[in-house]
Image (cartoon, rainbow, N blue to C red):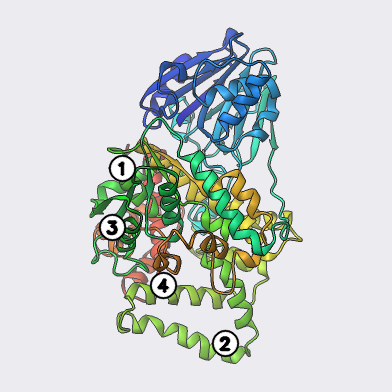
Amino acid sequence: MCGICGLTTPVDRGALDAMVASLSHRGPDDEGTYVSPGATVGLGSARLSILDLSPAGHMPMQSDDGRVTVVYNGEIYNHKHLRRRLEGRGHVFRSGSDTEVLVHGYEEWGIDVVARLNGMFAFAVWDERERSLFLARDRFGVKPLYYTDDGRGRLTFASEVKALLAGGLSVGPVEPGSLHRYLTFLWVPGPHTMFAGVTKLEPGHWARWRDGGLSVHRFWQPRFRPGETPDETASRRLREVLEDTIVRQLEADVPVGVFLSGGLDSTALAALATCAGDDPVTCFTIAFRAQDAALEQSSDDARYARLAAQALGANLSEIEVSPDIVDLLPRVVWQLDEPIADPAAIGTWLICQAAREHVTVLLSGQGADEVFAGYRVHRMPALANAAGRLPFSLRQHVLAGLVAGLPGVAGKIPGVSSGLTLAAHRYLAKMLAGVDLPPEERYVFYRSYYRDAELAGLYSPDLRAAVGDAVAGSEHLDYFAEVPTADFLDRMLYVDWKTFLPELNLAYCDKMSMAASVETRVPYLDNEIVDLMLTVSPRMKLRGATSKYVLRQAVKDIVPQAIVRRRKAGFGAPIRTWLRRDLREMVDDLLSRERIDARGYFDAAAVRRMVDDDREGRADNTYRIWALLTLEIWHQVFMDGSLQ
């Protein structure tokens, strides 16, 4: 696990060194640079040592003849299998690192090596003989890779945008279309970024720079084949693949632990890890104070984590936090690079900072919801279709009235928290609002925090003109069109894989864990698990109201039944309380009329109404306010340079 970077002719060695230094949090154990003959290409690496801690794993790593030079970020889980194949073809290895598999793999198979890799990765290969630079990013984009191409033969790339800035990238104006997408989804869909001129190499893609030109290609395109794995054998087969996956992903020359939220996904990982080893598994969970979490849908993760740890005999470190959010938020925004308005990033950073004292690698349940259909949005089509069959008057007046009345009973139903009641209201109200939309547009609406027309009312005249008639969800609709014949559940999962998963969940998980110099692995995105699930029928993923059905069946004998039956509880933070209390002064300052007018993006009166409506209970604008607050802090950090 590392931070990598590079640039092409003319190579500025000082800029390359600065880029590596800016990535030191990603790789505190070792660093190195390489400049090719003639200074055509410069490569840099900051290394977090995981496999082969000796100097033999140093990067950039070169082939014996000097033809191939590699910098690499990630883990290749099938590196032992590939090593045996390569040794059988005469290759001689000098280290135990998986990086060397890339060196010899490229020598043997060229760019086709990328299709043979099972892992999470972003890497660059300079081929001195071919005079070409080869970049690649894993199937799901677990590891990030940003680049700039000036169109005049100069390419710069890095694991983080801040490295591009350290290398001399001039910050341009915010790209209006990306700003529009960010406000809609709380993150920017790839390949776009908020930085003009900075592009993400998309997941499952490779790029080649040669003769001053860059070409980008896709190497992985999933194909759903439901029914190839019969329903009656799906859970058994999944269990077998899960067990193999955990053995692969526990491999490390440093201590490994598990994120444990007390949900199905993380508990299953901990249980499988327990079965795979002889020693108790080390687990970490985070808990916010009950008074802080009262307005959120779930405040009992720690209780379930304790239950899981006790049942598994695991060693549990429970981290109760009451962070100084005013000071912490700008640091989180800086580490994220891109504005990502999900408070789960805060919890991830805090737990990784605490875990770093004990482990260097953490297994995470990220990706399970996207692979096995675990989100509420996956159940919404069935609910919306049922509601859509009701007479219009019944739906609009009776059902909508019942939903509207839910906030009034918050905290008054024994055994049901205020946060859960309010979450049910938000969910059902959103479902009803999208009933009459076509299925694909309805999915986009359910993933959104604004409709395009709503945002027009928030924008200043200048931004409204710059955005024009942009459709924030256009990429989502294009992805739906790539799998037109699949079952609609699988089509939703496919769009999740292309958008929500890499641009939100994996993005903040990578940035926040690496900010603490911790490698996070995501076993549910292992090639073998995903390839299997492509052959499993949708009814084994979502059966009635039961999400992740096949996973529940696969692990029901090793996971406590209370957790197998536990409802979905998102990993987040108590931002409703924070916005109303800890961050109240910051909100009033950073979203004041003076600052809004000076920035020029929004209508200050519309922003003030949003804040007042939220505080006075007329609307739940929590995430809209959080997005604006995050955006302003991001702008000050990266555009103004005033909070670094």
What number is the disc on residue 287? 3
| Between discs 4 and 1, the one toward the N terminus | 1
Q: Amino acid at mark 3?
A: Ala
- Pair 3/4: label in front: 3
SS class of the residue under badge 2? helix
SS class of the residue under badge 3? strand
Q: Residue tagged by mark 2?
A: 395
Badge 1 density bin: few <14, some 14–19, many ≥20, Cα 10 Å: many
Q: Quadrant of the N terminus?
A: top left
Badge 3 density bin: few <14, some 14–19, many ≥20, Cα 10 Å: many
Residues 592 and 290: in front is 290
Residues 93 and 183: in front is 93
Please indicate whether residue 269 sits to the left or right of residue 382 in the image.
left
Could you give the CA–CA distance between mark 4 and mark 2, rounded to whole angstroms?
20 Å
Could you give the CA–CA distance between mark 2 and mark 3, rounded to whole angstroms?
39 Å
The residue sitting at 68% across, 12% down in the picture is 129
Q: Residue tagged by mark 1?
A: 355
